[in-house]
Every structure is written in structure tokens, then in C-alpha cells.
Image (cartoon, helix red, strand yellow):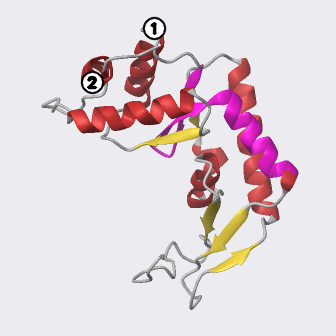
Amino acid sequence: MVVSADIFISTAQAFLCCGKKKRQIPHSSCLDMAVQIIALDLGLKPAVLYDLNGACAEQIQRYVGSLQEAGVVTTALRILSISGNCLVVNSNLMKEHLSEVLKKNSLLTVDVCAWKEQPSLIVMDTNTKHMVKDMLDYIMDKEDQHLSVIVVGEELYEQWNLCTLFGILLGYPASYWFDQAQSFENCLSMTPLV
């Protein structure tokens, strides 16, 4: 099915504008978000971090719901809100992805602790495994409740390394890790990443 770009632009403009002045979202940003949503719908990635503007989880859900009603998105997508950050999630793919991470036990993790001279590869530790398992269990539990917006409470994520978690949820091939009990700083400042 060929869909006009206009539907993606008008839907984003209708549901994602926020703030007192409700500033219009640039068309290019609307289309970029549409491409990300289509990638989720097609199962190409488990999640997308919504960072277009300050739209809340409910606005993002209305946007996704409108695209579903229009028939341009056919997969059940959910909004996952963690510490004020919203991810649009392909639930089925996310469950498969997190299960696979746990099963393979081979998540590529880069230790970027501030006291290191340079980043180093580490194996997935017990805390990260527990974090992934807790997240999987939480998503499955909330899915049974048929919630379209899943808000992860602070009591669950307060001990998690959100940098690592977001890398995992977004399906990145590697995730950064640092000892947040020591510092939120890292050893990457002024380090070329190529």
C-alpha cells in the first residue's frame, strides 16, 4: 500500500505538538518519526526512543493510535515510559528480543566508567541480567492488562543503569555501562568514537 506523506505530517501535527504555543513540528521531523514507526511496524527494530519534542506518553499513544486507525500501522505498538523518557515499542518483537538477550547471555557491553583510561568490553553481569529479566516480566505483565501506555515506576528502575537498558531496549548491538553508584561521568569525553 502506498501512503501519502501528508497523512504522517498531519497526524504528527495533530497529536504531537506541545507547549504553550503548540509550535508546529517541521515536516522533515514528522517524516523521520514516520519512518521510525514504519520500521517498528515492519518488525525491523524492537523500539524507538521518542525524542522529537516534549510530547507526553498519552500524546504519542494518540499519534500511534491514529496511524493504526488510518491503516498505515498494523502492528500493536505500545508506549513505554521510563523516567520521563518515552519509547514506542513493538511488544511482540521486544519480548522476543529481551528473551534472546537472556538466552544468549552474550550482550556486548562497553564499560565507560570515568576512572578508566579508555572503554573496555565486559560480559553481561548479574545486575544487567536481572534488569533485562525484570523489564521482560514487567512488559509481559502489563501486556496481560492490555495497556497501551506502560509507565515503569521509579521503584523498579531506580537501581537500573538506564543508559545500558535503553541500549538494550533499542536493539543496539552494544550498550554502554558505567558504575552509577560511583559516578554518572564516563571516559568518553573528547574521545573519537571511530
Between 101 and 126, the one nearer to me in the picture: 101
Q: Residue furthest left?
A: 21
Question: Which amino acid is tagged 2?
Answer: Ile
Question: Which amino acid is tagged 1?
Answer: Glu
Magenta residue span: 76-103
Instruction: Determine crowd level at label 2: few under 14, some 14-19, many 20+ residues with C-alpha closer than 10 A.
Output: many
Q: Is residue 19 above or below residue 183?
A: above
Q: Is residue 93 covered in magenta?
A: yes
Between 175 and 145, the one nearer to me in the picture: 175
Position of residue 77 in the picture relative to residue 191 (left or right): right
Residue 54 in which image quadrant: top left
Q: Is residue 30 above or below residue 13?
A: below
Q: Is residue 86 above or below residue 63?
A: below
Q: Which residue does the numbered mark 1 point to in the structure image?
A: 69
Q: Position of residue 15 (x, y in %)?
A: 31, 21
Position of residue 34 in the picture relative to residue 173 (left or right): left
Q: Which residue does the numbered mark 2 point to in the structure image?
A: 9
- Which residue is at a point 68% across and 26% down the rendered structure image? 142
Q: Position of residue 4 (x, y in %)?
A: 31, 18
**Element class at badge 2:** helix
The answer to whether residue 79 shows anywhere in this view is: no
Instruction: Determine crowd level at label 1: few under 14, some 14-19, many 20+ residues with C-alpha closer than 10 A.
Output: few
Residue 21 in which image quadrant: top left
